Amino acid sequence: MSYAQYVPDDERDELAHLAGDLRLACMRIARRIRFESPSSVAPHQFSVLCRLADSPMTPRQLAEIEKVSGPSMTRTANSLVARGLVDRAPDPADKRSVTLSLTADGTRTLREVRREREQWMTVRVGALPREEQQVLAQAAEILLRVAAR
Amino acid sequence: MSYAQYVPDDERDELAHLAGDLRLACMRIARRIRFESPSSVAPHQFSVLCRLADSPMTPRQLAEIEKVSGPSMTRTANSLVARGLVDRAPDPADKRSVTLSLTADGTRTLREVRREREQWMTVRVGALPREEQQVLAQAAEILLRVAAR
DNA sequence: TATTGTTATACTCTATAACTATA
DNA sequence: TATAGTTATAGAGTATAACAATA
């Protein structure tokens, strides 16, 4: 833990305050986007579609990344396959394994859902003055790095 | 919708891009904080504790704010009352109504959970260079306003 | 008659344990 | 024997409909 090292009290307070504000803002925004962007795919389904958009994967890989159990991922995958958004193909090399991938319909649906969700943020950021948008542009780059750590 | 007015194409693209990045960053951060801050209270319980920390409320008010049904809120409140984090008191003026409020234990638990969640962000923001922390400090203030819109 | 809250019931997503097929 | 995936079953969360008590 990097807090063993000496940091003046007021700087630590400032950092804690900044971290607290950022966490609160991110969680509130995420919550409102989830609530206020009515979507045809549930959050856990959306996550899976996003992963599969990066690359096709096995159920096991998806379960590990999404931190859910194997049976849960089977269920989620089943619902997406049933809706025609995901394709389940047997692996020719290893007959125990299957590969999940987005269908054309899945790709289109994912794009639509993303656009709906972005709409929430676009409306609000668009209403801000130019200078604040520029601050957010710098912050967005930093926050994406933070999210990836 | 404010997009009826004329905005040059490249500015609109920039805005869409900024909004997209911000949404992605906020949702990823929120997701990781939820996943990686193992807490004894589930997300929906945490939300209710936060609301009750602001002020005592009836189940109906909570259900409306949290956008869940009455019976769902009854269930959530029951679990929190059973754990001693929330107190359910009959309203002397209107005998149909009850008032939910945090117990001392509930207040303490809420404070602990918040600290755990802030820890995730504190570690990562603390690792950034001074200049980036200053950008985030400006951004935090703006984002809190955005979250409140 | 309208409102507050609860109970009854059902659906979804989650998990663990047991099972099948393949390596 | 170990691994990939599914099926079986149960536990929480959600919802709607029906009910009780009170206004």
Image (cartoon, coloured by chain):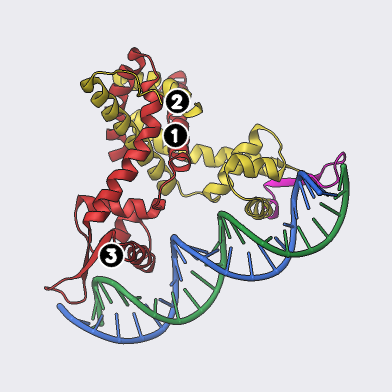
Chain colours: A yellow, B red, C green, D blue
Residue drawn at (30%, 55%), measured in percent from left and top?
Answer: B65
Quarter of the figure with residue A104: top right
Tell me the subunit letter for badge 2: A
Q: Nearer the viewer, mark 2 or mark 3?
A: 2
Q: Quadrant of residue B131?
A: top left
Residues at marks 1 and 3 on the same chain: yes
Q: Which residues are magenta?
A: A81-97
Sequence order check, earlier mark of 1 and 3: 1
- Residue lying at 79% horizontally and 45% vertically, measured from the top left: A97
Q: Residue at 36% x, 55% y: name it.
A: B45
Quarter holding residue D20: bottom left
Task: Note whether A136 is above or below B74 in the view shown.
Answer: above
Q: Nearer the viewer, residue A20 or A91?
A: A20
Q: Amino acid at mark 2?
A: Val
Read off the residue under disc 3. Answer: B59
Asked if the residue under mark 1 is in contact with the one under mark 2, i.e. CB atoms within 8 Å, the reply is yes
Residue A146: give its label: 2
Q: Which residue is mark 1?
A: B29
Q: Which residue is nearer to you in this view: B83 or A123?
A: B83
Image position, residue B77 (x, y; %): 32, 64
A49 vs A134: above or below: below
Task: Inspect the magenta stretch and tell me whether residue A96 lies in it.
Answer: yes
Tell me which chain the residue with mark 1 is part of.
Answer: B
Please, what is the three-letter code of the amino acid marked with disc 3? Pro
Residue type, numbered disc 1: Ile
- Residue B5 visible, this angle: no
CA gap, disc 2 and disc 1: 8 Å
